[in-house]
Image (tube, rainbow, N blue to C red):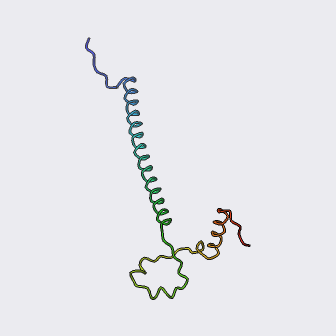
Amino acid sequence: MVKVRSLRRSWEIKMQERQEKKMVKDFAKQLKEEKQQKVEEKKRRREENLKRRLENERKAEVVQVIRNPAKLKRTQKKRLRGIEKRDTLMLSTHGERKTHTERLRKKKLPTST
């Protein structure tokens, strides 16, 4: 008796192939997710470093309040390029007095009121 190869595949072989395809897809999906997580982590770290760098630059700035804006017209162009406008509420005279009284409190000296 000669065995003839059937035209249909057996159920076990079909299920085995289906399972292998599923495993390959899952593995590819897992690799893709890991790669995406690495990209997101790198992006997040870059943003944090940039933000920290900007904060450090702001802390290290030398700030001088210009009370007479007419003086700006007399300054040289090269110096004007380096001048930037900032919020001066923190640097107002009232704010300076407040910080001065806070310094006195830290030193435990009597304040005059």
When the figure is inspected, residue 20 is found, relative to residue 83, above or below; the finding is above
Q: Outermost residue, right direction?
A: 113
Quadrant placement of the C terminus? bottom right
Side of 74 relative to 13 (left or right): right
Q: Is residue 83 above or below residue 61?
A: below
Indicate the position of residue 72 as horizontal and vertical percent values.
47, 85
- Residue 72 sits above or below residue 91 on the image: below
Q: Nearer the viewer, residue 55 or 107?
A: 107
Report the residue that reaches farthest toward the front: 109
Looking at the picture, how far across and down is residue 65, in whole percent? Answer: 54, 78
Give me the residue at 58% from left, 73% from top. Answer: 91
In the image, 1: left or right of 16?
left
User: Above or below — where is 104 with respect to 82?
Assistant: above
- Compared across the picture, whether 82 is left or right of 89 comes to left
| Residue 86 image point, x, y percent | 52, 74
Image coords of residue 93 (percent x, y): 62, 77
Where on the picture, by quarter, is residue 87? Answer: bottom right
| Quadrant holding the N terminus | top left
Q: Which residue: 49% across, 62% down?
A: 55
Q: Residue furthest top?
A: 1
Front-most of residues 3 and 71: 71
Image quadrant of residue 32? Answer: top left
Residue lying at 65% horizontally and 63% vertically, measured from the top left: 107
